[in-house]
Image (spheres, rainbow, N blue to C red):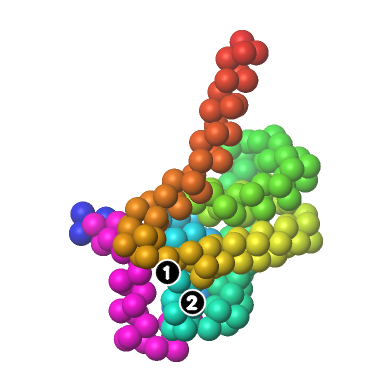
Amino acid sequence: MNWLQFAVDVFLHLDKHLATILQTFGGWTYALLFFVIFLETGFVVTPFLPGDSLLFAAGTFAALGELNLGLLFLVMAAGAILGDTANYWIGHAIGPRAFSGEIKYLKKEHLDRTHEFYEKHGGFAVVLGRFVPIVRTFVPFVAGIGAMTYHRFVTYNIVGGIVWTALFLSLGYFFGNIPVVKENFSLVIIGIIAVSVLPGVWEYAKSRWQKRATA
């Protein structure tokens, strides 16, 4: 329970935690930010780590001159791209073994369908999935399982990582230090998370409606 409370506290008070980290670690803060973004996107067991909200918070500190915006962008974009790359290769390594037929409910035909989907729509999934918390952790993993052609994956991975990092850093940089935002930072972070989740909720609801209409 203590870990859960700590995770919630980090999400809701990133400004305070980041300020403490900066005071404690100084220049090493860049390495820590890289590591968090890399873990959040690189391993299916760590989707609970802050992503969008961390970028936003980092952008607010860059606007104050506490962090260098250019270096921040390079470090965090690299973390996002390398994280997805690691996740892809983990999935790629696990896929053939998991769908070898030894596990009853994991059949090779499911793997073939996943591969077919990612060959047709994988670029769209990799780029847009980047903007949805939790989903962005699973998309590259499943792309690896489905053996999406690597050069296609890495192209969309780079595009998605750059756009995602630039967007949320910019939002924090230009809007994070507006008085009303600073005074309600916790609500802003909740809002960012909620808006990030909305596309996934919408797509799920739409698919449900379409299935009912077809039935």
| Callout 2 amino acid | Ala
| Callout 1 amino acid | Asn
Could you tell me residue 21's position as x and y percent? 34, 80
| Apparent side of residue 8 relative to residue 52 in the rendered image (left or right) | left
Identify the image quadrant of residue 109: top right
Q: Tag 1, which secondary structure?
A: loop
Could you tell me residue 211's position as x and y percent? 60, 18
The residues bearing labels 2 and 1 have C-alpha atoms spaced at a distance of 8 Å
Closest to the observer: 59 or 204? 59
Where is 140 relative to 166, above or below? above
Q: Of marks 2 and 1, which one's residue comes earlier in the chain?
A: 2
The answer to whether residue 42 of the structure is visible from this angle is: no
The answer to whether the residues at label 2 and label 1 have Cβ atoms under 8 Å apart is: yes
> In the rendering, which numbered label is found on residue 151?
none
Residue extending farthest to the left is 2
Where is 215 relative to 57, above or below? above
Closest to the observer: 62 or 114? 62
Q: Quadrant of the C terminus?
A: top right
Residue drawn at x 57%, y 20% is 209
Q: From which residue to which does the magenta span run?
A: 5-30
Rate crowding at label 1 as few (under 14), some (14 to 19) or many (20 or more) other CA atoms within 10 Å.
some
Question: Which residue is under mark 1?
Answer: 177
Q: Quadrant of the N terminus?
A: bottom left
Closest to the observer: 54 or 106? 54
Identify the image quadrant of residue 6: bottom left
